[in-house]
Image (spheres, coloured by chain):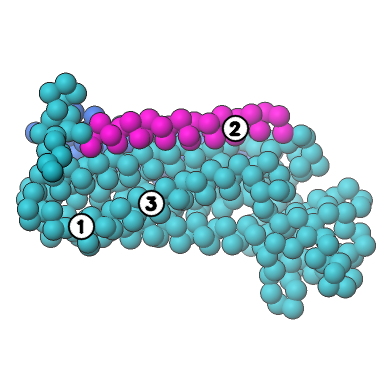
Chain colours: A blue, B cyan
Amino acid sequence: MSLKTFHLVFVTVSVLLMLVIAAWNFGNYRDNGTPADLTWGIASVVVAVGLLIYGKVFLRKFKNVSYL
Amino acid sequence: MDIPYTVKPRPDTGLYNAKVGIWLFLASEVMLFGAFFSAYILLRVTAQHGFWPDVADGWPHGLLNIPIGTFNTAVLISSSVTVVMAWMALKENNFPKFRNFMIFTVACALGFLGIKTFEYKEKFSHYVIRTTDGKVVTGHLDVDGKSPLFWNLDTVKSKNIEKLKVEVDIPNKYRFPVGMHVPEDIHKAHAEGRHHDEKEIEVSQIESLKAFIPSTHPFFAIYFTMTFLHGLHVLGGALVLAYFTFIGTDLWKTNPEQFTNRIEVGGLFWHFVDLVWIFLFPVVYLL
């Protein structure tokens, strides 16, 4: 597995982490209604989407580099 | 002597030798960290109830600084992006660009370690105090304007202190696991910007006083063990990447392909270290 492939795995896991953090913040917001939790939750979703877009751009830019 | 397959793939594996080597090494690392994650699960499910008398959960929550942990996560994710960019810069034959990205990566690693050191120091001066009436508070001691590290009840008694000034934490909401309602007075205190209450506690009323160190609770034991082990990996990775950036660059002039492969191998290790943190962060900070 090349660094390119491992990087894509890493970006995928990072997106999942951001979604976990978002769920955790939304859970806190549901329990306590603190606006900061809602803000952090939304911010985490935004970062997750940003990482997805980055992954797509990365794939397009380095399509000639081997996956092995 | 010529070392074979440093650039060209070996026919039977289809990879150059260093890449096979680093993946074998990373497989052993997965087993190492996997053992610690297993230990974490076992410690957590067997934890004795009553760390917080008012929370029916044996596992402490809300004792780590989540914003700082989140910032450190962002630092490591950024460094993974830049190490890949450095490798790609070499593939584009652009050495100055490679060096800039690598400097940023090493700076991120050092930044991460600096922040972690600050976090550790903060924990060593943070105490959990149990009083004879069954109450438990956490906070920092105030001894002549200083916040001492690594004290215990014997240290306090040996200094003939009768009353201990404590900046008692107003529990943050993260002390109460998701699904549990946080008491209104805690919300109110935080809304008013109050995070601590200054109190004086009679030393004779103190049953135990322990810093946030590994022997205080299995949570701290596994937290310090795993994060310290991870920190050592960050330090090791940073040293190797710094070597490639500043000292070991002559190879670029004589054998650029091999140099590029070395950076790829270093980058693979760096990604592994960052991936461990991606799992470690939610496990110890959030859950």
Tell me the distance, in whole angstroms, between the alpha carbons under discs 3 and 2: 24 Å
Image quadrant assignment for residue A47: top left
* Chain of residue at mark 2: B
Q: Position of residue A27 (x, y in %)?
A: 56, 35
Q: Secondary structure at mark 3?
A: helix
Q: Amino acid at mark 3?
A: Gly
Residue occupied by mark 2: B39
The span shown in magenta is B18-47
Q: Position of residue B218 (x, y in %)?
A: 68, 41
> Is the N terminus of chain B in the top left, top right, bottom left or bottom right quadrant?
top left
Q: Amino acid at mark 2?
A: Ala
Instruction: Say whether marks 3 and 2 touch (CB < 8 Å).
Output: no
User: In the drawing, what numbered circle is on residue B236?
Assistant: 3
Q: Nearer the viewer, residue B131 or B231?
A: B231
Image quadrant assignment for residue B94: bottom left
Instruction: Determine the main secondary structure of the stretch shown in magenta.
Output: helix
**Along the polypeptide, which appears first: circle 3 or circle 2?**
2
Front position among marks 3 and 2: 3
Q: Amino acid at mark 1?
A: Gly
User: In the drawing, what numbered circle is on residue B248?
Assistant: 1
Instruction: Say whether marks 1 and 3 touch (CB < 8 Å).
Output: no
Both labels 1 and 3 in a single chain? yes
The mark total stands at: 3
Q: Secondary structure at mark 1?
A: loop
Give the farthest residue toward the bottom.
B144
